[in-house]
Image: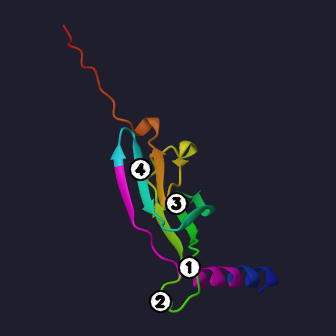
Amino acid sequence: MNDKNLVSREDKAAKLALRQNYLTPAVDIYEQDGLLTLMADLPGGKLEKLQLDIDQGILTLEAQADMKLNGEHLFVEFAPAGYYRQFRLPAHLNLENVNAQLDDGVLPLKLPKSEQAMPRRIEVKTVH
């Protein structure tokens, strides 16, 4: 085994251990007007700590929560965690025109369908 493989495995193990402390964000998915809209709840999520990736048909959503509270901690039961979730995307989406926007901890992600997936009307002609 070479050192490169060892480092890669250690990195993956460290990332996996960190993700075990992540929360799974609640998500609603809607289909309308030729696109899928994914709405993810990311309370405390900040744009600069949000990462969206699509690789080999898998959408990965990862975000760090940032909640700063004023005052001295007297008792703490909740610590902000990160968010992590993955989705396998259908092949009929146009992944070149994905649109995402983070607003007050809500992430709408718009995934348009490709032209081939859009419904078509077929004109029927009569033969005389």
Front tag of 1 and 3: 1
Q: In the rendering, which numbered label is found on residue 19?
A: 1
Front-most of residues 51 and 115: 51
Please give the name of the residue rendered at 72% of the width and 79% of the height, measured from the top-left corner: 8
Q: Earlier in the sequence, mark 4 or mark 3?
A: 4
As helix, strand or loop, the secondary structure at mark 2 comes to: loop
Q: Earlier in the sequence, mark 4 or mark 1?
A: 1
Q: Residue furthest right?
A: 3
Instruction: Name the spot of residue 38 as percent of width and height, x first.
Output: 42, 55
Relative to 95, residue 22 above or below: below
Instruction: Name the spot of residue 101 as percent of width and height, x first.
Output: 53, 51
Q: In the rendering, which numbered label is found on residue 37?
A: 4
Relative to 39, residue 84 above or below: below
Residue at image mark 3 = 59
Front-most of residues 114 and 103: 103
Quarter where residue 14 is shown: bottom right
Q: Residues within 10 Å of mark 4 (few under 14, many from 20)?
A: many
Q: Earlier in the sequence, mark 2 or mark 4?
A: 4
Is label 4 in contact with label 3 (beta carbons under 8 Å)?
no
As helix, strand or loop, the secondary structure at mark 1 comes to: helix
Residue at image mark 2 = 77
Please give the name of the residue rendered at 52% of the width and 71% of the height, measured from the top-left corner: 84
Quarter where residue 3 is shown: bottom right
Instruction: Name the spot of residue 26 as percent of width and height, x first.
Output: 40, 67
State the CA–CA distance, disc 4 to disc 3: 13 Å
Front tag of 2 and 1: 2
Q: Which residues are magenta?
A: 10-30
